[in-house]
Amino acid sequence: MSLPAAPFPAEDRTLFWPYALAALGLALLLWGSSWGLFVAPAESYMGDVQRIMYVHVPTAWNALLALTFAFGCALAFLVRGSWRWDARLEAAMEVGTVLSALLCMQGAIWAKPTWGVWWDWDPRLTTTAVMVFAFAGILTLRRFVDDPVKRAVWSAVATVIAYVDVPIVYFSVKWWNSLHQHQSSPETVSKAFHWPLRINAFGILFLMSGMIALRARLADLRRQGEMAPPLPEPGTVALGGAR
Amino acid sequence: MSALAAALRKEALIQWRSRAQLLAVYLFGAASLLLFSFAIGPDSAALRQHSAGFLWLALLLSSTLSLAESFGHEMENRAFEGLLLLGAGPRSLYYGKALSNWAQLSLVGIGLVPVMVVLYDAGTPRIPSLVAVIVLGTSGLSAPGTLYAAMTAQARARQTLLPLLLFPLVVPVLLASVKASSLVILGDPMGQMGSWILLLVAFDLIHWSLCGLLFGRVVED
């Protein structure tokens, strides 16, 4: 029995780099997290609960980065009309939405022992929740539109509007009393906490970039499958079991 | 301009011929107001306190019904494509539809005020201010709502998709409208009204211009 030499077409060998990037990111994430869990000292007020910061803060940075990239992809698609940007938009939005949802969960786990509640109607939390629902709505829209052209244009338009809305939500809820702390900077965080935070930030960045590249490839393949001309009638060509 | 006038005339005609739908949406809003009071119980002070929030929730729920149906006539027999071929231009079609939706939602909102006053004891002598808030708030609902309705009218499961897309987007409108209406009903000793009105006006300006710009892409591609 003879099998083809490679399971994927030659062009799929380019998948090496996304996989390598994701693997590097995962390794960094494990390294940074074990540093944060076992090596870095406990914070003097919050104790061990603070250690969730090593994943929470990098998740927040990268979630915003992914959704900003999705916004850029939406604009690029609307201007240039290239399918590549649609695939990237889908990938970045999906990864960004998952990261934002993770962000809310991590925040809730941290908030219960610290604030005494799982959730608080604080500007930062409200904005993040609105962002998750806004982008999850657009991902749902993509599932309900069968025409690839309409799906791409509509989700790009909806992404632009949703992204423009986020700063408005942020400022509108900012006028409420805020509980969430302000952004940390190297000056406000002890040096002992810097390295795990930085390593995890790059870890999540690389993992996310690898996943976006892989997911974009999948989106592109799916779209090509949808737009491919219909197969010939059975009987005219042997449609063997192998794909 | 004449294209916009023609689009508005078309909308007025559709609204007049399907006026039973406006009544149905209004009744739905009134029924929602009745149901919300059961969430709190017969505590008249608490009901009055939350009356503005209930009014806007009822209006938001009603808006999804009227917005989801707003492109129904145009989608039948692909009439919308015919309108585009006539050279009306997507922008005038959008503004005609959005203005018509705005008028319809404002009417429903203003009509719900007496129901709110009776059920929640939320009377106020400053009725013109409350009407102004309703007009500004419904404008913020109808601008993005019309754009999303144009998308979802052509998709499967439009009744589910429209609220899913619209609700997170109109959070600032809901916040500002509830706050401003509440200040009208319960009094504004700290003079906070201006900032909420400013937020509503800013949201309206951004979305009326942005959605008008993007509508062409939604219907032409």
Image (tube, coloured by chain):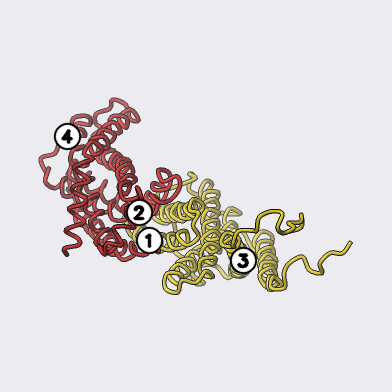
Chain colours: A yellow, B red
Is there any visible trace of residue B46 in the rendered image? no
Q: What amino acid does circle 3 point to?
A: Arg
Q: Amino acid at mark 2?
A: Ala
Q: Residues within 10 Å of mark 3 (few under 14, many from 20)?
A: some
Give the residue number, with chain letter if any, for mark 2.
B150
Calculate the distance from the C-alpha at mark 2 to the C-alpha at mark 3.
Answer: 30 Å
| Rendered position, A4 above or below B62 | below
The disc, 4 or 1, on the residue closer to the chain's N-terminal end is 4
Alpha carbon separation for disc pair 3 and 4 = 56 Å
Helix, strand, or loop for circle 4?
Answer: helix
Label number found at residue A217: 3
Residue A149 placement (x, y as % from top left): 47, 62
Q: Residue sitting at 23 percent across and 34 percent down?
A: B48
Q: Are marks 2 and 4 on the same chain?
A: yes
Mark 2 closeness class: few <14, some 14–19, many ≥20 residues within 10 Å: many
Asked if badges 4 and 1 are on one and the same chain, I answer yes
Three-letter amino acid code at the position of disc 4? Pro
**Camera-nearest label, 3 or 4:** 3
Mark in the foreground, 3 or 1: 1
Which residue lies at the image location 29% right of the left edge and 34% below the top edge?
A: B28
Mark 1, residues whose alpha carbon is within 10 Å: few (<14), some, or many (≥20)?
Answer: many
Tell me whether the residue at label 3 lies in contact with that at label 1, contact meaning CB atoms closer than 8 angstroms: no
Question: Which residue in the structure is indicated by mark 4?
Answer: B114
Closer to us: mark 2 or mark 3?
A: 2
Whether labels 2 and 3 belong to a single chain: the reply is no
Q: Quadrant of the N terminus of chain A?
A: bottom right
Mark 4 falls within which chain?
B
Q: CA distance from mark 4 to mark 1?
A: 38 Å
Q: Residue at x 25, y 41 (%)?
A: B52
Can you identify the residue that label 1 sits on?
Answer: B218
- Tell me the mark number nearer the camera, choosing from 2 and 4: 2
